[in-house]
Amino acid sequence: MSTFDPRNDLPDEFDGSVRMFPLPDLVMFPHVMQPLHVFEPRYRQMVEAALDDDRLLAMALLKPGWEPRYEGRPPVFPDACLGRIATHYRLEDGRYHLLLHGICRARISRELPPDQAFREVVVKPAWDLYPTAGATRRGDLQRQILDRFRQILPDAAEIRQQLDQLLGGTLPLGALCDVIGYSLDFDRCFKQQLLAEPNVDHRARTLLEQLENYAGTAPKTRGEDTFPPDFSLN
C-alpha cells in the first residue's frame, strides 16, 4: 500500500458498526478536516461513546423532508463519509468542539436497533476506484481540474500559494476532487453526487464539468473569509 492509503486510518478490528451523525446541510468528504460544534444531548453522548472507543463517526446527509421527524430517525442518503475525531475540546456545559478527519466513503447497509440515544449504522467502506482504462487520461484530467480551480480562486496571493502547496501534484486525483468539492460552495445535492461516486474518473469528469460551468462566477471558497472554516452545527 502507498503511504497515502486511507485504509491505514481504519482500525484493524473495524467491523462496519459505527455511530452516525446525520446533518441537514453538511456533506463531509474524505481527505478533509471538518470542524463540528456538538450541542444536542444525544450527540454529546455519541461523541463520548466515540472517544471511549474507536473515535469513528459516519457523517450522513438527511434527505429532504427531514424537518417533521428530526427528533426521531428521518431518512438519510445511503452514501456517507467515515471520519475519525482528530481533536476535541469539551466545554464546561458539556458541548464539544471537534475536528473530524474524513477517511473514506462508506455505504450504509442498515441501521441498528435504537439501543442508544444516538443512531448507529453498519457501513461498508467504499475505496476509490481507478479503472485501468482511464490511466492514460488521468494526468490531463488532473491538470484541467487544477487550472479551472485556480481560475475561480480569490486573488489573494497567500491563499493561492497555500493551495498550490497543498494541491500541486501531491494528491491523487480522487483526493484532489474531494478537497475541491469540499472547498467550494457547491449545492449540497451536487456534493452528495460527488460523494456517492467511488469511480475516480467519473468523479473527476463530473467535477470538471461543474468547474467549467462556474468559471467566471467565482463561487466563494470555504477559506476565503475565515480560517479555520466555521463550525458546522448539529
Image: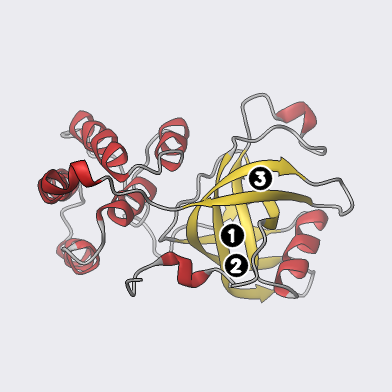
Residues 171 and 32: in front is 171
**Residue hosting label 1:** 36
In this orientation, does residue 39 appear? yes
Q: Secondary structure at mark 3?
A: strand
Q: Earlier in the sequence, mark 3 or mark 2?
A: 3
Mark 3 or 2, closer to the camera = 3
Q: Amino acid at mark 2?
A: Leu
**Residue hosting label 3:** 22
Figure quadrant of the N terminus? bottom left
Q: Is residue 190 left or right of residue 180?
A: right
Q: Vertical placement of 211 versus 122: above or below?
A: above
Percent across and percent down for residue 144 are 12, 44
Label 1, label 2: how far apart the Cα atoms are: 5 Å
Percent across and percent down for residue 226 are 39, 60
Percent across and percent down for residue 185 are 37, 41
> Answer yes or no: do the residues labelled 1 and 2 have beta carbons within 8 Å?
yes
Label 3, label 1: how far apart the Cα atoms are: 12 Å
Q: Secondary structure at mark 1?
A: strand
Query: Measuring 18% from the left and 61% from the top, which residue is drawn there?
Result: 160
Q: Earlier in the sequence, mark 3 or mark 1?
A: 3
Q: Is residue 232 left or right of residue 139?
A: right
Instruction: Say how many tags the image has.
Output: 3
Q: Give residue 192's mark.
A: none
Label 3, label 2: how far apart the Cα atoms are: 15 Å
Q: Amino acid at mark 3?
A: Pro
Query: Measuring 43% from the left and 34% from the top, which residue is drawn there?
Result: 193
> Answer yes or no: do the residues labelled 3 and 1 have beta carbons within 8 Å?
no
**Residue hosting label 2:** 98
Q: Vertical placement of 216 versus 150: above or below?
A: above
Query: Measuring 43% from the left and 65% from the top, which residue is drawn there?
Result: 6
In this orientation, does residue 91 appear? no
Q: Residues within 10 Å of mark 3 (few under 14, many from 20)?
A: many
